[in-house]
Image (cartoon, helix red, strand yellow):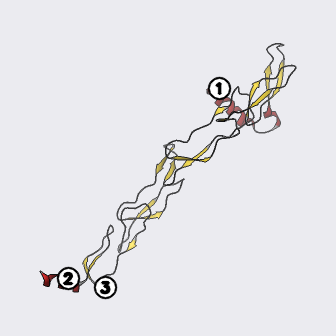
């Protein structure tokens, strides 16, 4: 595997000019130094060039790929998306699969994995919803507003019992709404007891 990574590094640092499409090789029969053609993306080198023949390239089989001009002896195996990832573009002969985080997850670079978006705690609203690249950002609900635990809910203003024609039974806090009571209904209930 180290050999293939070294080749890929050499290829990527060589650039895409014409010289990166060739390599030097010593013919095992003649001992002559030869300049051979590399194989194009989507193929691998079945046989190196000789003094009498060009490099022989063959297409990558399904499930394998090469992304750059190369002289490796077999194509690289396609990657597999890991836990909490989905395929954004499938592997083909000239490119590996591209993975992305599932809905509700984001890429956390320091862990090198997709992590579930934060759920804002009670008393906190969503300042910005999470995306595939960043987590949900929460903020503390200001006075007069509340929020239950949710990844999507913003802080909501407490209901006005007076506007509803009711009395305030329990003042709202940052984690619950005001509780109102209809005094007429309360009087009727007390008379039936």
Q: Nearer the viewer, residue 33 or 165?
A: 165
Crowding near the residue tagged with mark 2, few <14, some 14–19, many ≥20 C-alpha atoms within 10 Å: few
Distance from Cα at disc 1 to Cα at disc 2? 82 Å
Chain-order first, disc 3 or disc 1: 1
Counting from the top left corner in percent of width and height, residue 146 is at 36, 70
Distance from Cα at disc 2 to Cα at disc 3? 16 Å
Counting from the top left corner in percent of width and height, residue 99 is at 58, 45
Q: Which residue in the structure is indicated by mark 3?
A: 162
State the residue at coordinates (20%, 82%): 186
Crowding near the residue tagged with mark 3, few <14, some 14–19, many ≥20 C-alpha atoms within 10 Å: few
Q: Nearer the viewer, residue 173 or 182?
A: 182
Checking the image for residue 186, the label placed there is: 2
Crowding near the residue tagged with mark 1, few <14, some 14–19, many ≥20 C-alpha atoms within 10 Å: few
Which mark is nearer the camera, 2 or 3? 2
Counting from the top left corner in percent of width and height, residue 176 is at 31, 69
Residue 178 sits in quarter:
bottom left
State the residue at coordinates (30%, 82%): 161
Quadrant of the image containing the N terminus:
top right
Which mark is nearer the camera, 1 or 2? 2
Counting from the top left corner in percent of width and height, residue 67 is at 70, 38
Image-based side of 52 in relation to 68, left or right: right
Q: Residue furthest left?
A: 193
In the image, is residue 87 above or below residue 13?
below
Q: Residue furthest right?
A: 52
Image-based side of 92 in relation to 112, left or right: right
Residue 147 sits in quarter:
bottom left
Quadrant of the image containing the C terminus:
bottom left
SS at mark 3 in the image: loop
Residues at circles 3 and 1 in contact by the CB criterion of under 8 Å: no
SS at mark 1 in the image: helix
Q: Nearer the viewer, residue 42 or 146?
A: 42
Checking the image for residue 3, the label placed there is: 1
């Amino acid at each position: 595997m180290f050999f293939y990574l070294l080749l890929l590094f050499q290829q990527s640092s060589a650039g895409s000019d014409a010289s990166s499409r060739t390599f030097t090789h010593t013919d095992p029969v003649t001992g002559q130094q030869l300049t051979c053609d590399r194989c194009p993306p989507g193929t691998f080198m079945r046989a190196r060039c000789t003094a009498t023949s060009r490099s022989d390239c063959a297409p990558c089989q399904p499930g394998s790929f090469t992304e750059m001009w190369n002289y490796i002896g077999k194509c690289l195996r396609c990657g597999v998306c890991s836990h909490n990832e989905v395929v954004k573009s499938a592997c083909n002969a000239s490119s590996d699969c591209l993975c992305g985080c599932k809905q509700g997850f984001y890429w956390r670079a320091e862990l090198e994995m997709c992590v579930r978006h934060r759920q804002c705690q009670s008393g906190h609203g969503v300042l910005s919803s999470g995306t595939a690249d960043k987590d949900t950002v929460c903020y503390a609900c200001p006075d007069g507003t509340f929020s239950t635990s949710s990844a999507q809910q913003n802080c909501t203003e407490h209901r006005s019992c007076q506007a509803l024609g009711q009395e305030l039974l329990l003042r709202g806090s940052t984690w619950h709404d005001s509780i109102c009571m209809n005094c007429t209904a309360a009087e009727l209930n007390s008379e039936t007891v």
